[in-house]
Amino acid sequence: MRLEGSVVRCARSGHTDFTKETMPIVEFETLPDSARVWVYGADRDISPDNAGKLLARTDEFLEGWAAHGNPLHSARKWTDDRFLTVAVDREQEGASGCSIDVLFRTLKAMGPELGAEMVTSGLVYFRDTNGKIQAVTRDEFTNLSALGEITDDTEVFDLSVTTLGEWRGRFRSRAMDSWHASLMELRAQR
């Protein structure tokens, strides 16, 4: 993939994956359950000012996002001062690997400006007893569970969802109802 002015051309296919031809961003809630989603979680809360910068840059990206030369019907949602969810209506056109790479690099490059990393690997997100969202490693999550600081009823966030239907149904859930349960120590009451 190489940058050519405002156009990104995929080295694998030769297709243009990002153009300045604008595509209106659609309302997140109007996309179908089959829409493909990518969820990015910040490693710490992002201030409202920095969230505004993040969303402006994301909107700029989405307005010009195309796959194989076709504009994508896309949307984004910002929640809990931590989570950016980007969605594409696959029934209209699917995002290519190259276009996803550009989004990934755009978000990664914004880390220093935001004071938080949006592209993290292996972090587990949960809401602590004070109502604050925490991002910890899997080992830390297991240790906090063993200490009783994370329980079956702890709210967790599943960034591994891949469709909007999954996002709507299980992005937020109780730890015992999510893959997070596998990280928790087994309890006698189960």
Image: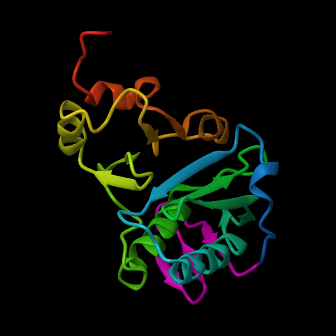
> Where, by quadrant of the figure, is residue 53 drawn?
bottom right
> In this view of the protein, which residue sits in the foreground, 38 or 80?
80
| Direction from residue 89 to residue 161 in the image, left or right | left
Q: Nearer the viewer, residue 34 or 118?
A: 118
Which residue is at a point 23% across and 17% down the rendered structure image? 186
Residue 36 in the image: state x and y as whole percent.
Answer: 63, 46
Q: For residue 153: magenta?
A: no
1 left or right of 31 in image: left
Q: Is residue 178 left or right of residue 186?
A: right
Q: Residue at x 36, y 32 (%)?
A: 180
Name the image quarter holding residue 44: bottom left
Residue 137 percent across, percent down from the top left: 23, 48
Residue in front for this viewpoint, 38 or 136: 136
Image coords of residue 125 (percent x, y) = 38, 48
Q: State which quarter of the image contains the C terminus.
A: top left
Q: Tell me, what colour scheme is on the image?
A: rainbow
Q: Which residues are magenta?
A: 1-21
2 drawn magenta: yes
Residue at 62% x, 33% y is 169
Residue 153 makes an appearance in the image:
yes
For image coordinates 54% across by 86% down, the residue present is 4
